[in-house]
Amino acid sequence: MQGEYRTRIVHTTVMRVLVPVLIGVVLGPACGSVGPSPLAMGVWGGDHIAMTITESSVHVELDCAHGDVPGAISIDARNQFDVVGTFVREHGGPVREGEVLDTRPARYTGSLTSSGMTLTIQQTDTSQVIGTFVLVQGAQGRILKCL
């Protein structure tokens, strides 16, 4: 009787530990990844902003400015992102030959929502917030460039 009791305890313990592990191994890949995933490539746009996302970079056009992020943007499990790049203030008229652009380090933070994306751009050397924008995937941005 004691041997039978011990066998039941071992069997129960093995089942409690092994079954959830096996379920995770079998069903885990079917349920999708919970790790970072890339932001959808293509065009995103909104008022005063247009963003183009490729496999290897992100380019942002703003009224009288532009910015770049080298590399892809990954979205975390909470649908948020936080990446660094550059921000360049522009001016009216042509860019002169040899002109040094006003390039600053910047942080691009945001989150995906049910209707698109919210993006905040902040210069990291001055902590100045450039702005917070709402973008929609597939929409063309509405930008007013400097004259």
Image (cartoon, rainbow, N blue to C red):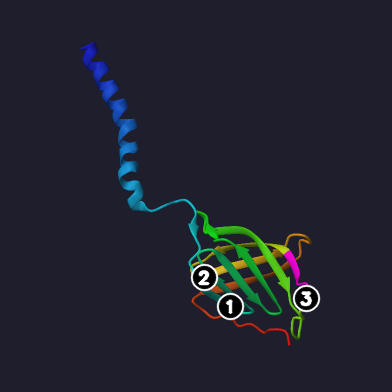
Give the crowd class for mark 3: few <14, some 14-19, many >=20 residues within 10 Å: few
Q: Is residue 112 left or right of residue 86?
A: left
- Residue 146, x across and y down, in percent: 72, 84
User: In percent of the image, x 74 and y 68: which residue is there?
Assistant: 103
What is the magenta range? Answer: 100-104
Image: 100 above or below 146 = above
**Residue 54: assigned label:** none
Name the residue nearer the viewer: 100 or 79: 100
User: In percent of the image, x 58 and y 77: which residue is there?
Assistant: 46
Q: Which residue is mark 1?
A: 46
Q: Are marks 2 and 1 in contact (CB under 8 Å)?
A: yes
Secondary element under disc 1, as helix, strand or loop, is: strand
Dot 2 amino acid type: Gly
Corner quadrant of residue 102: bottom right
Tell me which numbered mark, 2 or 1, is placed earlier along the sequence.
Answer: 1
Secondary element under disc 2, as helix, strand or loop, is: loop
Image: 63 above or below 17 = below
Dot 3 amino acid type: Gly
